[in-house]
Image (spheres, coloured by chain):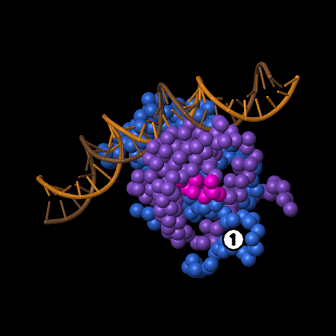
Chain colours: A blue, B purple, C orange, D brown
Amino acid sequence: MPAPPRPQPLRSAALSPPQPAAAAKPARRFVDDYLLALLARASHAVSEEFHARLRARGVGVPVWRVLATLSGLPKGQGETVTGLARACLLQQPTMTKVLDRMERDGLVRRHPDLQDRRVVRLTLTPRGEATVAELLVAARAHEAEVLARHPPAEVEAIKALLRELIARQDRPRR
Amino acid sequence: MPAPPRPQPLRSAALSPPQPAAAAKPARRFVDDYLLALLARASHAVSEEFHARLRARGVGVPVWRVLATLSGLPKGQGETVTGLARACLLQQPTMTKVLDRMERDGLVRRHPDLQDRRVVRLTLTPRGEATVAELLVAARAHEAEVLARHPPAEVEAIKALLRELIARQDRPRR
DNA sequence: CGGGCCAACATGAAACGGCATATTTTCCCG
DNA sequence: CGGGAAAATATGCCGTTTCATGTTGGCCCG
């Protein structure tokens, strides 16, 4: 029974309470109640540390994302350039160049798609597989550190809510 | 009563259920359970549209963030370069350059701090104030559109959880 | 089967961001 | 008070991202 999102006043702490002239909290700053800002700040706060560790190993964020995306693939499959761009939150031309460097560095290989000759399929090289294996260990370790800083129930709640937010936000688009 | 985050098993849906050999969902992809990825994807999914509208007006994301940050200031106050950098999730040298452009475009003004001559204080020009006023309208309108796509209760829940995540993640650092 | 339309990928010029470092001012401690 | 350490900005160089566009291949329909 999905009760449709009815009006429901919803103000959590707005509408000046009958407080006298006590200048307590003159109302939260715009940025502290703005969903886009909260998401960006949270993502940045949590990712900063790990991204620093990545670059300490000489791996950029886009490269890490490509490696992680390619590492979970079925078998002989390969992702396309555009698919990787979307998965890694980058534009397609940017992805092309990221892949140029990764190919030059021996991390990935491009091969033609036999069904559709416009498409380029990407797979990890052995070197790419080895690199991503290490990085996945580091990523899981870092995530464990982060989770340890927060009540487990809240983290699970956030994960679940984020998944739904993403699903609903992505679907109705385009 | 801050009950310290005790162990509490917490597995929400792990530990292979006694399902036979039915290869249903072979386990979620790494990226679908990785907190950093969920936050980045959610932030990107929600912000993408608005960022596009910004650039349609010729305003870059960092510029918008600076404007929004400066718009909520007490009175004759001004933020510092480093303060703005942190608030806008940028490095200080990058912020210096963003401010160079904004000053050139007549959006902000730099003035010296009388108490500490190392510090530069920034304020909005009338043109900056006018610009940010428009953008704030657009931002609130866009946020309303986003909120309309999701159950209000969930959005409030996410906001609250993100605020706590940010607070706990930022405090213990440095 | 031929034309127009759309999708996938690549490329080139220009803007931008990041890192390391230089400079100036303040702070602190003996 | 002198001198070293740390903070706040600025600068230069370089790698990366972006935007607009080009090119090739597939698709659909008359």
- Point out residue B46 in the picture as x, y percentages from the top left corner: 52, 59
Q: The C terminus of chain A appears in which quarter of the rendering?
A: bottom left
Residue A95 belongs to magenta span: no
Residue occupying image coordinates x 75% and y 71%: A21
In the picture, residue D4 is in which quadrant? top right
Residue occupying image coordinates x 64% and y 60%: A29
SS state under label 1: loop
User: The residue under label 1 is which amino acid type?
Assistant: Ala
Whether residue B50 is visible here, answered yes or no, is yes
* Along the line of sight, the residue nearer the viewer: D29 or A154: A154
Q: Chain of mark 1?
A: A
Residue occupying image coordinates x 73% and y 77%: A18
- Point out residue A75 in the picture as x, y percentages from the top left corner: 49, 44
Residue B73 belongs to magenta span: yes
- Point out residue B15 in the picture as x, y percentages from the top left corner: 70, 56
Above/below status of A123 relative to D2: below
Q: Which residues are magenta?
A: B67-76
- Count of marks overlaid on the render: 1
* Along the line of sight, the residue nearer the viewer: A123 or C22: C22
Q: The N terminus of chain A appears in which quarter of the rendering?
A: bottom right
Q: Which residue is mark 1?
A: A13
Residue occupying image coordinates x 57% and y 50%: B123
Whether residue A77 is visible here, answered yes or no, is no
Above/below status of C2 relative to D29: above
Label 1 packing within 10 angstroms: few (<14), some (14-19), many (20+): few
* Along the line of sight, the residue nearer the viewer: A111 or A173: A173
- Point out residue B38 in the picture as x, y percentages from the top left corner: 59, 54
Q: In the drawing, does residue A60 fall left or right of residue A139? A: left
* Along the line of sight, the residue nearer the viewer: A56 or B64: B64
